[in-house]
Amino acid sequence: RSQLRMSRGMPSVSGLAQSMEKMLSGVGDKVIELSRDKWYKLVFSILIDIIGIMTYLIPLLAELMDVFWAPLSALLIFQMYGSSLLTGVALIEELLPFTDIVPTATIGWLCQYTILGAWLGIDLSPKGPLRPNPRITEVRED
């Protein structure tokens, strides 16, 4: 039985939500697992910044796309760095017009793993092990 129920050619909202939840379950755990290695974290940071910049490829829809990308980007950055400060800066940077060029996630990596963080007085070193978001749980099959 398909998770998406078709209603006049369109999937139902609950079916779409279940499919999305199933697709995203475990993503937070995987991001945390891979972000424990500083080089994977750098790759993810660059990827997050590239996706944020790519919204400029569609000139008229760029800022509208940022409304959807900003919270996802902020969530990923929080999962990787555990910093509310960096998460807030990333969210605001993605929402403000014409600021997508700023590589916030990569700057976060530089602050955590280079002298830049100490020079700026920003401490992004983990205070303890990062944990998955407790609100994201495994999807149960009915």
Image: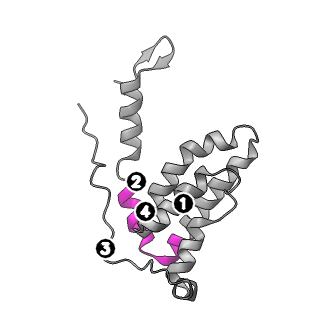
**Residue 123 at x, y percent in the picture:** 45, 81
Mark toward the start of the polypeptide (4 vs 1):
4
Q: Which residue is mark 3?
A: 129
Mark toward the start of the polypeptide (3 vs 1):
1
Residue in front for this viewpoint, 78 or 140: 78
Residue in front for this viewpoint, 138 or 89: 89
Q: CA distance from mark 3 to mark 1?
A: 22 Å
- Inspect the magenta stretch and tell me whether residue 17 lies in it: no
Q: CA distance from mark 4 to mark 1?
A: 9 Å
Residue at the spot x=67%, y=50% of the render?
A: 97
Which kind of residue does numbered mark 4 sit on?
Answer: Phe
**Residue 27 at x, y percent in the picture:** 40, 53
| Quadrant where the image shows the C terminus | top left
Residue at the spot x=56%, y=88% of the render?
A: 119
Residue at the spot x=42%, y=29% of the render?
A: 16
Q: Which residue is mark 2?
A: 27
| Quadrant where the image shows the N terminus | top left
**Residue 23 at x, y percent in the picture:** 41, 43
Q: Which residue is mark 1?
A: 90
Q: CA distance from mark 4 to mark 3?
A: 13 Å
Question: Which mark's residue is nearer the viewer, 2 or 4?
Answer: 4
Q: Which residues are magenta?
A: 27-41
**Residue 19 at x, y percent in the picture:** 39, 34
